[in-house]
Image (cartoon, rainbow, N blue to C red):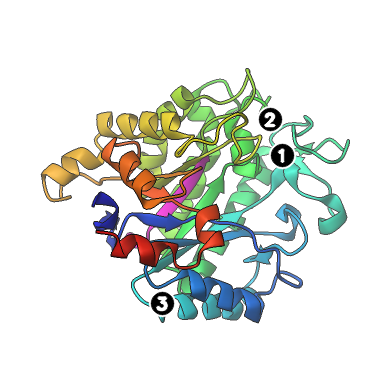
Amino acid sequence: MLYKKPVKVRNLILANRIVRPPMATRGTKDGIVQPEQVEYYRKTAGYTGLVILEHCYVNIEGKAGEGMISIADDSTIPGLRKITDAVHGEGVTKIFVQINHAGSAAFPEVTGLPLVGPSAVRHPRAKTEELPHALTEDEIIEREEWFVRAALRAKEAGFDGVEVHSAHGYFLNEFFSPVTNHRTDRYGCGTMEDRMRIHCEVLQKIRKAVGEDYPIAIRLGCLDSDEHGTTPADAAEAAPYLAAAGADLIDVTGGVWGYIREGHTEPGYYSAASMAVKEALERAGYGMRAAAAEGQEAGRPIPVILTGGVKTPAEAEKLLQENAADLIGVGRAMLADEEWTKKAMETV
């Protein structure tokens, strides 16, 4: 079965194609990892190819809510290290951490700071009438550095890679989406190059900081539930920019309205976007098909993760066989059954 086969992410080999996607536990105190969370992640490990730790804020300004884990300063590293040690002690599983800034989806009552974003427009999921401060170019660059320092902490804490969060209406995703980005400068929505500029700068700076061998993923919000928002065609156009900037893995999901796609519960309900991204990567020379044909030595193949609605191993296998993605995220089903991947790997 294809989902049992290994896959390469830069120089890291994942034992299989099953991913446990980031899902917030909201169990921290002041952003510090708690023993219950260490145990929670330990139980997710053993058989799953890749676990992605829930989003962690890169600065208090970007905290998405109470209970969110911090990766905002060096004091967080020992707690995060407890998670990576626990996961690595259980078997084949590799673990990435998702680093994030909530942007104008943050909670001022939690952060104690004003909202910020690409433009002074109300976030479609905002719970406040406060408009965000539209960041200057210098302020944008300052926040890029927060991501870089968080990535360095991730490496020091023992994570096998880092995932940059640009989905679900958070900070970086707000630059990609025309719903939240009304800028007219070089970070605006005038061209795809402009929409991708902050993403590419973040990826390039992280790559320079962490070195050539360390895997960098990006979670991209590829579809907005808004007639003026991001489409799968936009995601396809964006993907080669991300690849050229240093991304090793693209994790496809929803955009500014979040990870639920209204009216859709079918397995892989973002597959139109993931397939468009895969096809764009193939055309740009970063495809997995050519790599598979040539022993993964052709170019720099970039796998694509698809998450959403997958409940059974058969559903995961079907999506892989249809070339909808290269890895399949299984969230709620794993949450309900800690042995989901073990059972899947034992399936003949």
Q: Quadrant of residue 315?
A: top left
Q: Please name the residue that numbered disc 2 is placed on.
A: 180
Pointer 3 or 1: first along the chain: 3
Residue 217's place in the image compared with 51, above or below, is above
Q: Taking 126 as reference, is 83 left or right?
A: left
What residue appears at the point 56 percent right and 60 percent down from the top-left corner?
A: 336
Q: Please name the residue that numbered disc 3 is placed on.
A: 88
Taking the magenta stretch, the answer to whether it contains residue 216 is yes
SS at circle 2: loop
Q: Are marks 1 and 2 in contact (CB under 8 Å)?
A: yes
Pointer 1 or 2: first along the chain: 1
Q: Taking 94 as reference, is 230 left or right?
A: right
Residue 64: % across, % down: 72, 53
Residue projecting furthest to the front: 348
Q: Please name the residue that numbered disc 1 is placed on.
A: 117
Q: Amino acid at mark 2?
A: Thr
Front-lying residue, 115 or 206: 115
Q: Residues within 10 Å of mark 3 (few under 14, many from 20)?
A: some
Residue 322: % across, % down: 29, 35
Residue 186: % across, % down: 57, 29
Give the Cα distance between marks 1 and 2: 8 Å
Q: Taking 155 as reference, is 27 left or right?
A: right
Q: Tell me where the magenta segment starts and ends, as one range.
A: 211-220
Q: Are marks 2 and 3 in contact (CB under 8 Å)?
A: no
Front-lying residue, 54 or 119: 54
Taking the magenta stretch, the answer to whether it contains residue 266 is no
Q: Amino acid at mark 1?
A: Gly
